[in-house]
Amino acid sequence: MEKKQKVLILCSGNSARSQMAEGFLREMAGDRFEVMSAGTEPAEEVNPLAVTVMQEDGIDISSQQPKDLSLFLGKTFIHYLIIVCSKAHDACPRVWPGLMSENNRLYWPVDDPAAVEGSEEERLEAFRSARNELRDELTAWVASL
């Protein structure tokens, strides 16, 4: 059996975007990848709206927990680094220790749905938009490998 390649997905709070991306990638290619996510400034919990919109797509991320980037930096060899927000991109070391190749560093800036203010429905729409963007990026990326 071939060993799974490690993928680390980063955003600032590790409460929404990177958690949704982790859930999607596990669902679509968990047989190929060991998927992890982390944040540069992790929140206390996964955003409940992220959990809700992922459940709409049939993916349960309710048991996932935010993790600090320091748990992985320089300690874990990874094959792919996927950064899904500009804040994490700016905070992340330009050269990642243990990254197989800088060509395996992907940057997909997705607007932070948690920053959207408004009604519950407006906030849910922001989370759905981020979810859909991440799903599309991941689907295209997995298909390209």
Image (cartoon, grey):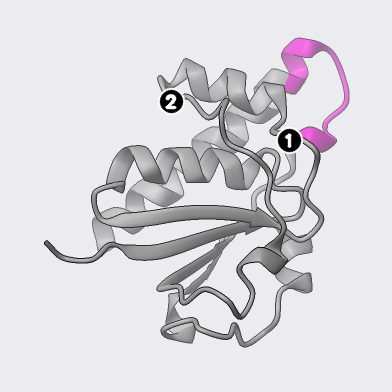
User: Taken as a whole, is the magenta stretch helix, strand or loop?
Assistant: helix
Q: Which residue is drawn at 73% across and 63% down?
A: 88
Q: Image height check: is 52 above or below 31?
A: above
Q: Looking at the rendered structure, which numbered label has been put on residue 85? A: none
Marks 1/2: CA–CA distance: 18 Å
Check disc 2: other Cα within 10 Å, few if <14, some if 14-19, many if 20+: some
Tell me residue 67's x, y (percent).
68, 51
Judging from the image, what secondary structure is the residue with disc 1 in? helix
Q: Point out the residue furthest to the left here.
A: 1
Q: In which quarter of the image is residue 143?
A: bottom left
What are the residue bounds of the magenta stretch? 114-123
Judging from the image, what secondary structure is the residue with disc 2 in? loop
* Quadrant including the C terminus: bottom left
Disc 2 marks which residue? 59
Q: In this view, does 43 lie to the left or right of 15?
A: right
Of labels 1 and 2, earlier in sequence is 2
Tell me residue 3's x, y (percent).
23, 66
Q: Is residue 90 left or right of residue 104?
A: right
Q: In this view, does 91 lie to the left or right of 18?
A: right
Q: Residue flagged by tag 2: what amino acid is it?
A: Ile
Q: Which-is-in-front pick, marks 1 and 2?
A: 2
**Residue 134 in sight:** no
Q: Which residue is drawn at 38% across and 43% down?
A: 26
Q: Image height check: is 15 above or below 74?
A: above
Q: Residue at x 71, y 74 (%)?
A: 92
